[in-house]
Image (spheres, grey):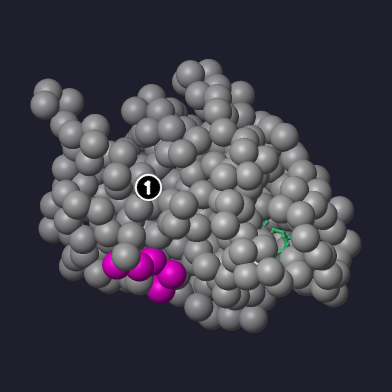
Amino acid sequence: MADQKLILVTGGAGFIGSHLCTRLVADGHRVISLDNYFTGSRENHVPGVDYREGHTKNIEKHIPETPDLIYHLGEYSRVEISLKEPALVWDLNKDGTFGVLEFWRKYGGKLVYAGSSTKFGDGGLGRNQSPYAWTKASNTELVKNYSAWYGLPHAITYFYNVYGPRERPANEYGTVIETFRRQFLKGEPLTVNAPGTQKRNFTHVDDIIEGLVLVGAGGIGDDFGIGDERAYSILEVAQMFGGEIIMKPATAGNRMGSDIDTAKTRALGWSSKRNLADYIKQVCKK
Ligand code: UDP
């Protein structure tokens, strides 16, 4: 294939990374995954991908190759629990990402960074609401600076509450759609953290992958929001599932809502094609 690329996906054994690997292999690329298996899983491995296990801060040891494109998705990725383990977040997101940026500086290629939409939460206050949000927001600045200092091509994406197959199970690192799905199927009440009116732009993982591929091919610079513009409150989502709801206390680090701007991704031909209501109907069939 003429435009076959060597693509490195950090976090390739994770929820979003594994879907990205599937797509990149199907498109004919040579794909290497670097994952530390902290939340990634061997069950997410897909045929055709070359898997390496290790910390991103040791990336040079694990990746002797020179990728044409790096998708840097492999970071600590949960908001509320990050308040309880800042040292781990620092290790994975600051030391780890510094390793990736140094690798990029030495070997070149294009870097696509998976930023976090938490930085747009609550009118911009979201960026400081948790160690997770802050490390992700400050990393977007470092990526831009590396790009400018060393003349390297980059693009920064911002995902909005991703759901879909392989979403992490309902534990402390899980996310709300899969948590509600499991509660619903077990006949348990759905646990809504107060106030329940906090809103999120839930986005199907297939739409995220479509956006990532377009940005990888043609995106330049910051501000590639990838998210469904429809926002639902957590209470509305619980009601879409149906069944009993119990309210839980408010959690620290939580944001009430977020701005969303997908203009730059749309300009590449992207639009969100799936919706949460259909997914919930489909996964709630017992
Ligand atoms: N949430 C909830 N019940 C749960 C799990 C999460 O009400 O059992 C809330 C959580 O407090 C947040 C929203 O759902 O307001 C989305 O949480 P999630 O962890 O999925 O993603 P976040 O937006 O925090 O990245």
Left or right: 134 with respect to 154?
right
Name above or below for residue 101 compared with residue 229. Answer: below
Residue occupying the point 31% across, 39% down: 23
Secondary element at tag 1:
helix
Residue occupying the point 31% across, 51% down: 9
Q: State yes or no: residue 83 in magenta.
A: no
Residue occupying the point 17% across, 56% down: 50
Which residue carries the number 1 mark?
A: 19
Image coordinates of residue 255 in percent, x first then y, are 77, 57
Q: Nearer the viewer, residue 17 or 118?
A: 17
Left or right: 244 with respect to 10?
right
Q: Give the residues in magenta.
A: 38-42
Left or right: 209 with respect to 89?
left
Query: Looking at the figure, which quarter contains the N terminus?
Result: top left
What secondary structure is the stretch in magenta mostly built from?
A: loop
Please give the count of numbered marks on the rendered protein: 1
Image coordinates of residue 214 in percent, x first then y, are 40, 28
Name above or below for residue 5 compared with residue 188. Answer: above
Residue extending farthest front:
286
- What amino acid does circle 1 point to? His
Q: Nearer the viewer, residue 214 or 238?
A: 238
